Structure formats: structure tokens, C-alpha cells
Amino acid sequence: MSFFTHFGRYLLLIKGMFTKPENAKMYWKEFMHQCNDIGIGSLGIVSIISVFIGAVSAVQTAYQLVSPIIPLTTIATIVRDTVILEFAPTLVCIVLAGVIGSKIASELGNMRVSEQIDALEIMGINTKAYLVMPKIAAALVTIPLLVVIAMVLGIWGGRMAGTASNILSADTFDKGLVMNFLPYNVTFALIKSYTFAFIISSIPAYYGYYVKGGALEIGKSSTKSVVVSCVMLLFADYVLSQLLLNPAT
Amino acid sequence: MIEFKNIEKAFGDNLVLKDVSHLMETGKCNLIIGTSGSGKTVLQKCLVGLFEPDKGEIIYDGISFTEMTQESRKQLRQQIGMLFQGSALFDSKTVEENVMFPLDMFTNQTHQEKLKRVNEVLNRVNLVDVNNKFPAEISGGMKKRVGIARAIVLNPKYLFCDEPNSGLDPQTSMVIDKLIYDITKEFNMTTVINTHDMNSVMEIGENILYMYQGQKEWSGNNKEIIFSDNQRLNDFIFASEFLKDAKDMRMLEARGKISNDRNMDEMLK
């Protein structure tokens, strides 16, 4: 199947989600269920990754800043900006593409091959709206929140590693943290996280919803959905950086 | 009553249904039979709207299904119940939640009212003490019965069953057949069943459509099928030596009994 066929079907899937719900209460229930699965379910892994990313970036920045004329506060500034601009939104979303993406693709794929989607269609339910939309909406709500949590935990991890290894004191770190702070960086990170949330929920939903075959095909489509999501996420990362951060544009 | 006229359906160059027409009667078990690949599942999926036929018309009680808007189809589908080959129960929901799902989605009843209705239909399919079990915790026959309970919970006018006996032992198959038959009579539904099961054909086949390579080859009922001289149908129905012998015995039995039954005598000639 060509790229254009996939892209056309993907657009039709997205378009098909926007219909009047058969029962708004049931859609809300499904949305809250997905928020729990995607948000609360991923909180543990996001927390662990963020703390270690922050800690490693603090230690590695200190390792590279060998000149005595560069103040130690620079370490905190670099940790803050790398965590906010890149590590929290991009790395966390790449991990979430694996965690959430494979879950969405395999869940919908299993529902497709075991005829559960057909059963819902026969009942007169718009399955694109009932099964796909709550997942995308839940990702759009919870992933930016997870990214904000990742920012906070990443910076805290850097502070903890910096002070624990005697690279710099907590006061110096805090001083560096507020130096030359640009609130726009947080806005940029949130724009990225909304874009990534859409990518890592809608692409696996597409691959899961249209799966054909059996258990083997579900596994293949789940893997493919994660690979395509990651590539699209990195491509979107580059495009957004060019559009929103490049001083020449 | 469901009538379909001149239905054609192709997948690429492969013409799966070729000019199929038939009438599925109300209050009867209407069977679609045929070998694997004969097009019976595609035909049933066309009837419920999961596939769009390339040509032809499907009419539900005088209303053209093929010409309906999506919104009208959604309304009609609330009058359709379907039992799938693999039951298609929602894995993450309990038996009670599975059966309650259509009520949750399409009614404004209170939880108590819905629970009462769920217990009614579960009792009707002879299932007790399974409300809180998950589909993975019950047997294949019980899953089929939960599937039937879910299909009839909204009192549908039309019931579709895709291979209701697949994977079941003969005794459980007969229980499921009897249940579908009784429910059809009780609620005066138009029931359409896809099957290869010869017991079902003989027990509940009140209106049978035999498909061969995407075409209607024969139609009749379970009494007429014994005396049919259609070779393809006979090869399909009486595939084993045992069944051929059983047919011969039935024919002889019928000959003995038909001395004062002219119609049957004429059929045998």
C-alpha cells in the first residue's frame, strides 16, 4: 500500500471521529478510562526517566565545562534549557510512543481481529469516534501534563546529582536556574508536547484500527506503529524547532 | 422480513457474490449454508452493512437498507442483534457489563432497571452466577450464550448469527440451536444464521439458502432438503457415508409413510 493510500485512510479515520456521540456519558467514561491508562499508567516510567536524564545532563555538562572562567551557575542553566527544550518533551514522548503507542495499536488490533469492532458497528456505534477519539483526547490532555512533570523532575534530578557529587552547591544551582530564564521555552515545549501527543496516539490508532489477520499481524502493526510514530515525532521536532526557534525564520 | 435482490460483491477481480436474491422470513430461522469460500459470510456482512454490495438491493421490512442514510442505518442497527463466530465479547468487561453495554449506550434507564433487564436475558439464555466473570473465565458455550444475551437485550427485530456452533461439542451446539429457535419464535424475530452444521440444518432450518461459489444454488426447508436432487447440495449435506446411509434410510422411511401423501410421493418421483 502506497504512502498516499495510508495517508488518505489516516485522514479519513481522523475525519470519521467527529460525529455526534451516541451517548455523551459513555464517551466521557471512556475518555476518563483512557486518561487513567495513558496518564497515571505512564507516570512511573516518565518520573524515573526524567530524574535520570536531569542527573546525567548535570554530570556531563560539568564534565565538559573545564574552563575556570565559566561560572558553575552555567551548569544549572544548561540543565534547565536542555531539559525544558528537548529532553522532557522529545525523549519522554519517544518513550511514551513505545509505551502508549504499542498499547493503543495492540488493543485496537485485538478488537479488530476478534470482531469486537464489528460488534460495536452492528450496534450502531461510530467506532472511530468511540474507540479512537477518547484515546487521542486523553493523550492531548495527559501527555503535556506528563511533560511538565518531566521538566520539574528532570531539573530536580540535575540539582540532586550536582549537589550529591559536589559539583556545585544547591544555592549555586538555584541561582543558575533563574538566570536568563525565557518563559517562551516552556511555551515551545508545550507546543511540541501537544504535537507529539497527537502523533503518538493517532498513528498507533490508525495501525491498530485497520489491522487485518491474526496475532502475528497485531504484533507487526504494533511494532510498525511505534517506528512510524518515532520517525514522525523526530521529523515534527525538527520542523517545529526550525519554525519556532530559528532566529532566521 | 429481509429481502435481498441481485446482490453482487467483488474484492478486486474476485467476484464473491453473483446475483444473489432471497427472502428471509419473519419468525423463522433462515439459514445460509455452503462450503467454505462460498460467500455466505460476505453475504451476511452485506446484509448488516459491514460490507457495501456493488450491486443489488437489501430491503428490511419494506425499507431499502442500501439507500438509507448513515443516520437511518444507525437507527436501524439498534434493532439488529448479532452473534459472532468468536462471540466478540469485550475482554475488559465482565459478563454483566458486556450485556449491559447496549443498554448503557442507547437507553436512559436507571442502573437498577438495566440490571433487572440484564438478569432477565441472562436467565433466558440459562446463565446464572456468571455476572461478575470475565469472558476469559467462562467456557465457549457460555460465551455464545452471553453473545446471544447481548444481542437480544434491546429486543431486536432481526438476529444474525455467524457460525453459532463453531468450536462447540454436538450437545452444546443443540442447546444453542434450540435457544436461537425458541428466541426467534418468542420474540417473532427474523433470524439469519450462517452455518455448516448439519444438525442445525436438520433441526432448525425453516428457510435454507444454499450458496455455491457465490451463487444461490438451492433454497427450501429442512424437510425438502432430504429429497432434493441437487447434486451439489447433496454432496455438501451428505458428505460422509454415514450421512448418505441416513438419507437413504429417511427416504425409505418416507416412502413407507407416504402412501396417502400425494405431494411427498410426487417429490420422490
Image (tube, grey):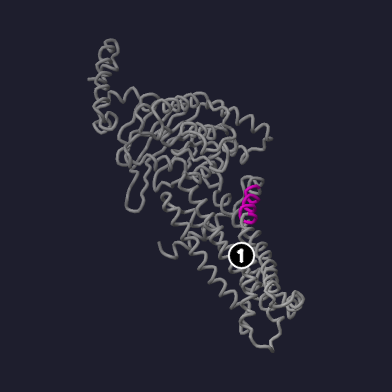
**In the figure, is residue B113 to the left or right of A131?**
right
- Residue at left offset 58%, top offset 78%: A242
Q: Quadrant of residue B25?
A: top left
Residue at point 42%, 39% (across, down): B44
Residue A200 placement, left or right of B257: right
Q: Nearer the viewer, residue A46 or B36?
A: A46
Mark 1 lies on residue: A49
Image height of A165 relative to A220, above or below: below
Residue occupying image coordinates x 53% and y 40%: B77
Task: Give yes or no for residue A36 being in the magenta stretch.
Answer: yes
- Does residue A171 lie above or below B201 as drawn? below
- Which residue is more in the foreground, A88 or B50? A88
Magenta residues (range): A29-40
Tell me, yes or no, if residue A85 can be seen here.
yes
Q: Amino acid at mark 1?
A: Ile
Quarter occupied by the C terminus of chain B: top left
